Image (spheres, rainbow, N blue to C red):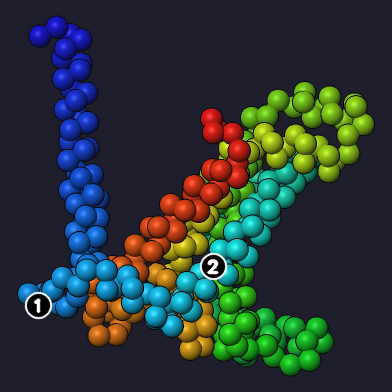
Amino acid sequence: MSNRMKINATGWFFIAIATVVITLFYFYPMAQALILSFQSGLGANLSFVGFDNYIRLFHDPTFITAITNTFIYLLVQVPVMIVLGLFLSVLLNDKKLKFKGLFRTAIFLPVITSLVAYSVIFKYLFATDGVLNQFLVKFSIIPEAIEWLTDPFWAKVTIIIAITWRWTGYNMIFYLSALQNVDQSIYEAARIDGASAFKVFTRITIPMLKPIILFTSITSTIGTLQIFDEIMNITGGGPGNATTSISQYIYNLSFKYTPDFGYATAVSFVIVILIILFTALQFRVAGDKND
């Protein structure tokens, strides 16, 4: 064989291995899960029920509550996290700022913190007799302790704060990396022309970061639609089902309630559909198809 044929053969060999592994551990389970979503029962007693599991979704009040909660997290937390990440990245990209490395590390540190560990810490911080309430009451910021974990509204606020605290630094690093690759002469020209800091940010920074903003919007959306750890460890889905997410409901259907893997799988495909729809919507809103 010629050298070129050997190189091609080697390349196809490695591609074949990757294809087999991905098919075996990714696409095959996905196909099996799709088949399972049209079935009901357990083990050898599985029976085909057609679209009954999907029809059941529209009449399941717990599922409606879970999807409503997930949309609240998505519509509130994702924009806040992206805007906050942009703001912090612009601040930390300032050449005049001292101790930039320390600030960047401090903001990114939550990303590498254990999900369970930080969730437990938040649970104790936001307890009725926790540090946060003690601080707020002591300095007369609030008249009495807030029921952060047992009030439906404040429990959602707690979850949103927890997610934002953890993942803002993740997005900030992407924006910061992109900003450091922007030619500084563009900013200098804008300042010479008399552009204000706000106009520089809206007319130069944001358009240049458009592909990165799109990427972080999609990843943040996917992560929020799959949110599980924070809710499971901080509120347990309570009070009642006030903070239950779709992912936690899938867990409950599979392992907490009487096991119903067929229906749980149908619920999980709702997340898949939502991710596809929101991703397509974000690409459309982004505008340029070539981005």
Q: Amino acid at mark 1?
A: Asn
Give me the residue at 25% from left, 55% from top.
30
Would residue 68 appear left or right of 22 to someone viewing this image? right
Residue indicated by mark 1: 45
* Residue 208: % across, % down: 67, 34
Residue density around tag 1, few if under 14, some if 14–19, many if 20 or more, within 10 Å = few
Q: Tell me which corner region of the image, top left, top right, bottom left or bottom right, holds residue 155.
A: bottom right
In this view, 53 is above or below 111: below
Residue indicated by mark 2: 71
Mark 2, secondary structure of its residue: helix
* Residue 126: % across, % down: 60, 81
In this view, 238 is above or below 247: below
In this view, 282 is above or below 155: above
Q: Nearer the viewer, residue 101 or 90?
A: 90
Give me the residue at 17% from left, 40% from top.
20
Would residue 29 appear left or right of 117 to someone viewing this image? left
Give me the residue at 24% from left, 50% from top.
26
